Amino acid sequence: MNGSVQIGRVVGVPLRMHWSVPLLVGLFAFGLGRQALPAWTPGRSDLVYAVGGVAGAALLTGSLLLHETAHAATALRKKISVEDVTLWALGGTTRMGRPQTAAAALAVALSGPLTSMLIGGVALGAGIGLRYLPGWAEIPAVILLWLGWANLFLAVFNLLPAVPLDGGRVVQAVLWWRTGDRERADLAASRGGQIMGLLMTAAGWISVLRGAPGGLWIIFVGLFIMIVAGAERRRATLTTSLRGARVADAMSSPADTGADWLTVQRFIDEIAATTRHSAIPLLDFEGRPSGLVQLGRLAAVPQAERETLRVREVATPLSQCAVAAPDEPLDEALNRLTLRTGPRILVVDGSRLVGIVTGRDVSRLMQRRSLGGAGGTGGGGATGADGGPIRDGPAGG
């Protein structure tokens, strides 16, 4: 979702649009305006078909937004944090925290498909009603019928038992409720998603070989499901491996730090030039953590500005960093990592920075645990070691 921009807010959370959305709208408009409308209402002008196609595509995009809004609104009602809602080529995704109960997970998963079913039923009913009106109502009636069937298809497709589709989330919630073991449920559902994605990809290839170009879309969807399900399976495995671990068990301490009031040039000369790490936590005048600076951001500062610009002005502020307490469960802290926060957790005890956790620190802890070690406190090394981001996959469908 790196290619998305914020266009507003919905139910209080950022609404983002991916660059692929205009392509999606164009495909919808073409299919309706050049194929469905001429076949169902022949004899109209190309302009009427074009306007009808654009109107129908806009309504379907709005339906996708309502589907994701239902996920976000339900999550907020269940006290689950929601990062944003994003529209993209495959419909949409809602990024949120992990539900704390199986009932909450089930409610969030079902809210989207139920919304699509409701929209589909209302659109079909309105379209059937307009069909009995003469002349002008024929085009709107066909658009509503098309919209209704599209929403019903969307609901049924999303209920397929494959993570990250809503049906896969339903399977997760039911297994969690039946077994009482969240990680076991996550592993089973993600494995089912990988199998479903593989079957869809194979079906798509067979369609393409038989001369059906629509099989390419099935391949794309299948590959997407396989990739996300695989990522969720790795996350579930990670959570199982880290069960019972605290943030202090993985953190590297003490952390290399720098003063946030230094100029960029002085920071480079005195700290960045001697560090082995690509990101350094910052402290304010009173010694409290104030953010994290990437050395790449420092390198991008023009030479002419380095003597006057303060390093805190190019750093990520603490409010946008992942922060955890030393005695907090490690798996809960890892859930705060996003593309925005980066792959590091600042460990803060009260108002004092006591360490940092990176992907490499977590890998080191997992290796110690696999050898039968207790995984005691202390990371056993210098801070700021770089590792890959660990984050939840998109929730919702």
Image: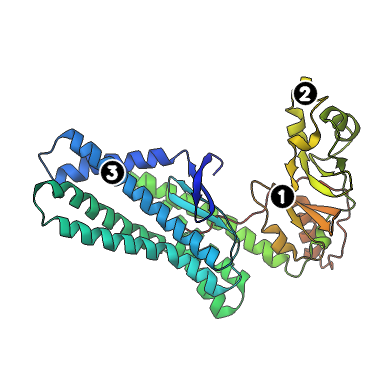
Give residue 293's quadrant in the image: top right
Residue toward you, 15 or 49: 15
The residue to which callout 3 is attached is 55
For label 1, the crowd category at 10 Å Cα-Cα, with few meaning under 14, some 14 to 19 and many 20 or more, is: few
Instruction: Note whether residue 162 is visible.
Output: no
Q: Amino acid at mark 1?
A: Ser
Verify CB contact (< 8 Å) between mark 3 and mark 2: no
- Please provide percent x and percent y for residue 158: 41, 60
For label 1, the SS is: helix
* Separation of residues labelled 3 and 2 (CA atoms): 50 Å
Residue 159 is tagged as: none
Q: How many marks?
A: 3
For label 2, the SS is: helix
* Left or right, 16 with reference to 284: left
- Please provide percent x and percent y for residue 77: 53, 67
Residue sitting at x 43%, y 49%: 90
Residue toward you, 34 or 185: 34
The residue to which callout 1 is attached is 319
For label 3, the crowd category at 10 Å Cα-Cα, with few meaning under 14, some 14 to 19 and many 20 or more, is: some
Nearer-N-terminus badge (1/3): 3
Q: Amino acid at mark 2?
A: Glu
For label 3, the SS is: helix
Residue toward you, 357 or 269: 269
Nearer-N-terminus badge (2/1): 2
* Left or right, 89 with reference to 315: left
The residue to which callout 2 is attached is 305
- Please provide percent x and percent y for residue 296: 74, 33
* Left or right, 227 with reference to 242: left
Instruction: Note whether residue 262 is visible.
Output: yes
Query: Which quarter of the rendered picture does the N terminus lie within?
Result: top right
* Separation of residues labelled 2 and 1 (CA atoms): 25 Å
